[in-house]
Image (cartoon, grey):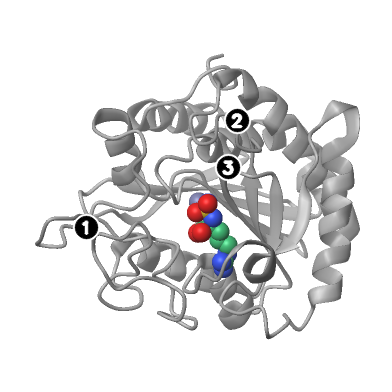
Amino acid sequence: KPLKTQYMTFQQMEWYLQNLNDSQHRKIDISSIGKSHENRDIWLVHIKSDNASARSVWVEGGLHAREWISPAVAFGLIDNILNNEEMTSNFDFFIAPMVNPDGYEYSWTNDRMWRKNRRDNEGRCDGVDLNRNWDFHFGVGASSYPCSETYMGPSAFSEPETQALRDAMTNRKDNLTLILSLHSYGQDLLYPWGWSHLVAAPNKEELIAAGNIFADGAKRDGGHTYSVINSAGGMYYASGATDDWALGVLKTKYVYTLELRDDGKRGFTLSTEDIDPCLKEVWNGLRKLLEHIA
Ligand code: 0X9
Ligand code: ZN
C-alpha cells in the first residue's frame, strides 16, 4: 500500500487507476475528460451513488504541479470513499486527482518548484497558470507575462486542461453542490471571491458557516487548524481561478479552495509523513461538511 506513505509519479497514478478500474468496476467509472498539451490523459473518477436523487461533489487535485500533497490527498479520498459505503448514500463523487499531468511530470523530472502547465509560449518561458485561465473576470488579477508564475495565458480557456475541466464540470452542473479545489500550502479554506474583496459572494455567510464546520471536523483527533478566509481579502487578489468560475458561472452552492499542509515549514516539499495525517484531517472535515450539506 504505497498510497499513503509516498508521492506517486504520474505513471504510478495511471497504474493505480487501472488497478482500481479492474477491482472496483461496479462502484466506479474512470474516464479521460481530455488531454494535456503533451497528450497525457486527465482522468476523472466517478464513485457512484445508487440513490437517484443524490447530489454531486467535485474534487480536483494537482492543478499546480509542485503542490504534491494535493493529488496525494485526492487519491486518498478516493480510497476512503470506497471503503466507507455510507458516503455514497447521498452523494456522487467526481474526483479528478491530477488535472495538470504535464506540469506534475516536469516537477518530478526537471524542476521540483514548477507550478504551471507546459504550454510552449514560444519565447523564453513556458507554461500557463491554470488557476488564472478561467473565464470569470479573466485578467483582473493575473499576469500577462509568460515568464510570470501567474501567467494567465493568451485568452480565457486557452488551455486544453482548463477546457477539459470546464466541459466536464458544466456537463454535471445541475447536480453539483460542492466543489473543492485542492492546493497547498497554508492550511486555509478559502471562499470566493478571489478576484475582488470589495464584492462579497452572494452566499458568503453560508460559505463561512459551512467552512467552519469543515475546520472543526478537521481539527478533531489531533488534526491541524484550518482558517476559513476570503481568497482576496485574506490572501491576495487573483482572478480567473477555478473557484470563482464555479461560483460565478456554474452557480454551485459550496465552492472552496483548500490550501493543505503545511503552515510554511516545509511548504511545497512536504514530507511524506504528512500525507496520512493531512488526509485524515481533510477526511474528517469533509465528512462533517457533507453531513451539513445533506
Ligand atoms: O493563487 C492561487 O492560485 C491559490 N493559491 S496557491 O498558493 N495554491 O497558488 C489560491 C487561489 C484562491 N482562489 C482565488 N483567488 N480565486
Ligand atoms: Zn495552488
Circle nearer the N terminus (1, 2): 1
Which residue occupies the foreground of this view, 69 or 93? 69
Task: Report the Cα–Cα distance between label 1 and label 2.
Answer: 31 Å
At label 3, the amino acid type is: Ile
Q: Is residue 107 above or below residue 237?
A: above
Please report the residue visible at 44 percent of the width from the left and 44 percent of the height from the top.
98
- Quadrant of the rendered image containing residue 12: top left
Location of mark 2 (residue): 265
Q: Amino acid at mark 1?
A: Arg
CA–CA distance in space, label 3 to label 2:
37 Å
- How far across and how far down the image is residue 153, in percent? 29, 70
**Disc 2, SS:** loop
Q: Tell me which corner region of the image, top left, top right, bottom left or bottom right, holds residue 132.
A: bottom left
Q: Quadrant of the N terminus?
A: top right
Determine contact: label 3, label 2, CB under 8 Å: no
Q: Is residue 254 left or right of residue 206?
A: left
Pick the quarter of the image with the C terminus. bottom right
Residue under label 1, please give it: 119
Tally of marks: 3
Residue 175 to residue 51: above or below: below
Q: Which residue is mark 3?
A: 28
Can residue 51 be seen here?
no
Would you identify the image quadrant in which residue 204 lies?
Answer: bottom right
* Mark 3 / mark 2, whichever is N-terminal: 3
Q: Residue at x 27, y 45 (%)?
A: 40
